[in-house]
Image (spheres, grey):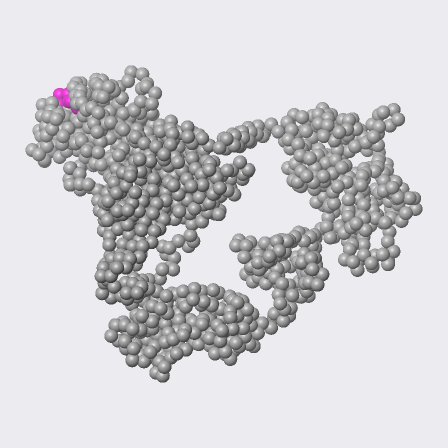
Amino acid sequence: MDQLYSGPLQLGSDMLVDSDSAYDEKQEDVAIISPEDSNSMDDAELLPRADDFEAMFARFLPENPDLETESQVVNTWDVEGWRSLPRRTHGPTFECAGHPWRILCFPYGNNSSESVSMYLEQGFDEKPPEDWYACVQFMLVLWNPNDPTMYIRHDASHRFTGDEGDWGFTRFAEKYRIFAANFEDKGRPMVENDCAKVTAYVRVLKDPTGVLWHNFVNYDSKKETGMVGLKNQGATCYLNSLLQSLYFTNAFRKAVYQIPTEGESEPRKNSAYALQRLFYRLQTDPYAVSTQELTISFGWENRQVFEQQDVQELSRVLMDKMEMRMKGTEAENALPNMFRAKMKTYLRCINVDFKSERLEDYWDLQLNVSGCKTLDDSFRSYIEVETLEGDNKYAAEGYGLQDAKKGVIFESFPEVLHLQLKRFEYDFNRDAMMKVNDRYEFPEFWDASPYLSETADHSEPYIYHLHGVLVHSGDLNTGHYYAFLKPHKNGDFFKFDDDRVTRATRREALEENFGGDYLMNGTNGIAGQRNPYTRTWSTKRAMSAYMLVYIRESRLDNVLLDEKHMEPPPHLPQRIAEERAILEKKRRDRDEAHLYMEVTVASIANFQHYQGFDLANWDNGDPEDPATPTKHKLLRTTTMAELSKFVAGDLGVDADLIRPWVMVNRQNGTVRPDAPIMWPTMTIEEASHKLATKHAKFRVFMEQTERDANGEPIWHWAPTAGPAPANKPIILFLKHFDVEKQTLLGVGHIYMNQQEKAQELASPVLQVAGWPPGTNLVLYEEIKHNMIEKVKPKVSLVASEIQDGDIICYQKSLSDKEENALRAAGKCSDAAAFYDYLLNRMVVHFHSKVPVAEEPAARFDLVLSKKESYDTFAAKVADHLTTLSGNPDVVVDPTHIKFTTINATTGKPKAVVKRGDKTTLSSVLLSSQGYGAYGGAYGPGHLPDALFYEVLEMSLSELELRKVMKVTWLSEGITKEDTYDVLVPKQGTIEDLTTSLQRKANLSDDTMAKIRVYETHLGKVYKILSPTYSVASCNEFYTIYAERIPEEELQAEEGDRLVGCMHYDKEINKPHGVPFNFLVKSGEPFKETKERLSKRTGIKGKLFEKIKFTIVRGGGPFQKPYLLEDEDILSEKLGQEDALGLDHVNKARNNWVRSENIFIR
């Protein structure tokens, strides 16, 4: 009882209540009682007396029709000697619904010395039973037994638990009021003669769902319901509700399990495998499951998981993808058998014997909500027969225009019927999408037979059971999705709200999701709730069903299969168990990481396979590369002797034949051996701290040796106590630059005395190299990455500052002729040049900018030097492409290759690389300012190791004489647009443009003979461009269209003229669509003109009827358009500068239309 309550609870009476946590006087959140919370004595004649318990119960604690009472009691505590009561006191214990209760009172206040505090408390002598709780509505009344019209009362509702076992009112009443001599002008105090009565009205409610007034702290869905939810990634609640619906359509789950995925190893690349894993985890995991693996397998990125999508579209795309995966498996027809049915669209003439019928498959149905009150109303609307008559007669083949009846009728309904309720519709008055929150009722059991055709199969009844209700709560722009599902045939509904699963009542699943207004309550006739998304009070329900799932009664057992019939494929639990074991191991490793450290060991074998700087690439993570040092994770307490023994086992040598050298970071940026570690009992942690570079990983080089004639290891020198001798041996590492193979590899190591001259290196080097004595050598010292210097032969090693761990590179001496030949072949003639190549080499990924048939040419890699000029790397790319072609007659000219940098964010072309005398690969890819425009201080903005390439029909110098122009080709009237980039001479004409367009769009000569090019601006036709019009005069900010001239224009008569036409949405300054030219016939009524306009635009039917046709005056956008009527003669109304306007909704606007369709890769 003495627990602290985290915060107050807002009640219907606008009073703050809290639990008793106050005896320790730490609580600051106290109950605030406003005047209206206590009864006003002015209305005493209207209020019941405190001793009329039944009337008090009925007046102040009326029953909620939505909640069922388990038991209710009234108990009164006679309080005597009020002023002598202890600081904390209890009333007598009483029972309600089998639970003990009592009143807890602080007569001198709890955290508030000015107020009396009172609470209702569970009355167990010890702790309540485990998992005990009770949902209680209660009222506490303090009253004067001598005048029962004097009382103070407060009521509340609370879920009492073992942790929250008391609830009530910290400021129940001010002390000065209850002891005042004239309380509320009654002429006596409330507590009279130190006596009063406190009555507790307690009503314990039934809790069929188990979550009434639950705070969901430590709530366990699996424990309470046997099921788990799905985690919300951001805005994936709509996905979660659909997935739970499909999961509990057990036959669908079984079909998904039957998709063969044994060979799959990466769920993020296979949506079927990812869905299998998700379903299996929903079956077995104890906690909510993440959908991230599934959405990644869909190919979704962050923006998709933070955008709410259309559930019907997602359902269809997912069904299509799963059906495709099931082809050729035992589940091949499972989904069509479950979800697919047929409807018939028919048209029958009334006066002649003509009819047209078409059978169509459907997987779900979209039903109107607006204008319909029930599900049956929607189906009656769906199959309503339309009469085609008057201007809307049907053109029957062979009979001309005829009156006819048109409609739809169902030939069958599927086993599982998905009904999409059209809760979101476009409101033409508001010019926006709106949510339809009208009340719309749907039954738990529904008969579909009235909507079947007479020829349908009626051998089984078409009675359907409601299986799922998918709900949207909120409005168009904000909201939340969740689902009510009935997992078992005769079971209860459960609410699936992302990661939380709770039991639900039938009323919660059905009636509360009908939408419409809240029902009036009995207290004041007003009902309403605060919308959790708009934070406004409304009498309209925020939540309403948007999708219903019905299952045919006769197929319930086929669809809601028993769990034993839905066994996952055997490899699935095995693989997930393995993954969990790996995760558990990683967790243990993290927990034990402080006990271990990483030791990286390089051997002479690594050195001999390594081509690069220093002894090894310590950061290389490729275990297959023989040059990669070995990483070991060892206990920090491992001794150096144990390390040597461990490494010797890896190398296959005796432990006494290897010696560890500690690697250190030198000031010049190199990593070299510093000294052998001669203390076998020293731990690796101690060696790292004392001998190695601080804040660096512990790296060791293992020196290897041989035995002498006595079987003892040969070590040339070992450090001893005291200063080292002046002529101590030093270890030097040898690298060989092979000029023929153009390789630079480690060879081994030698020992030399410090005082020896550099020229004395020749003998041991020749011996190691296996070359005959007298071979001329050139020796270099690898000082650091960008400093490779020749060794001075007559200077001592110590004078040359050569020390332990230094690297000497040797090569054979070459003649001038040999050096020139190597340079001519593009090879390095000396080690210093090769080191420079190693320093500047980089792998560049080349991608074809245009699709190519040969896969190798679509993407390839070349190792190039950052210093290479534009001409050099272009020539290498050309040579590579020539080799890839495999045709000796095909030679790619490097001057015809155009390179483009690649945008690092979008992967699309960024800037064209221009050839220049000073252009190098480094300036193109690695410039800190970025190549091309807008690099700026924010970095290059393009990939630093990749380029697009394109082989042109002309050289780059020729290309500079041309310009790229964007042309939109209208291939089918104005309904289809194809945009092309065409190359045109800068001094060329429109005829040159159309010639290039013909090649790009593959247009016939016949089409080219009737082509027209025109320019548009601000949604209007600006100018028709003649073939001789100069392209230099075209405005780069205008749009160029090309089209085939319509036949009616080719047959124009005298007096006819062309007019430019524009589309706009209510206002002329809101243009949309494709501006076009239209032939205006002299003297033609506009009613007939509209028929030609319908054909020209491709817009027909109701969409065409909604268009308002206007004359847009040439004076500018501020002149009001003239609205055309059917009887107008357009040729007489049009001015010379006027345009024809089509005022209709822009369906391409993106303020509510999604930017892209849902996809699953």
- 612, 325: nearer the viewer: 325
Q: Residue furthest top?
A: 125
Q: At x 69% / y 57%, what residue is drawn?
A: 886
Residue 541: in sight, yes or no?
A: no
Q: At x 77% / y 26%, what residue is drawn?
A: 654
Query: Whole-percent x and y of residue 941?
Result: 56, 56
Q: Residue furthest left?
A: 45
Query: Whole-percent x and y of residue 920?
Result: 67, 60
Where the N terminus falls, by quadrant? top left
Residue 5: in sight, yes or no?
A: yes
Q: At x 47% / y 68%, what residue is drawn?
A: 969
**Range drawn in magenta:** 192-200
Q: How many numbered callouts?
A: 0
Q: At x 22% / y 36%, what residue is drawn?
A: 12
> For residue 354: magenta?
no
Query: Whole-percent x and y of residue 62?
Result: 16, 32
As drawn, 1018 above or below 618? below
- 539, 155: nearer the viewer: 539
Q: Residue furthest front?
A: 353
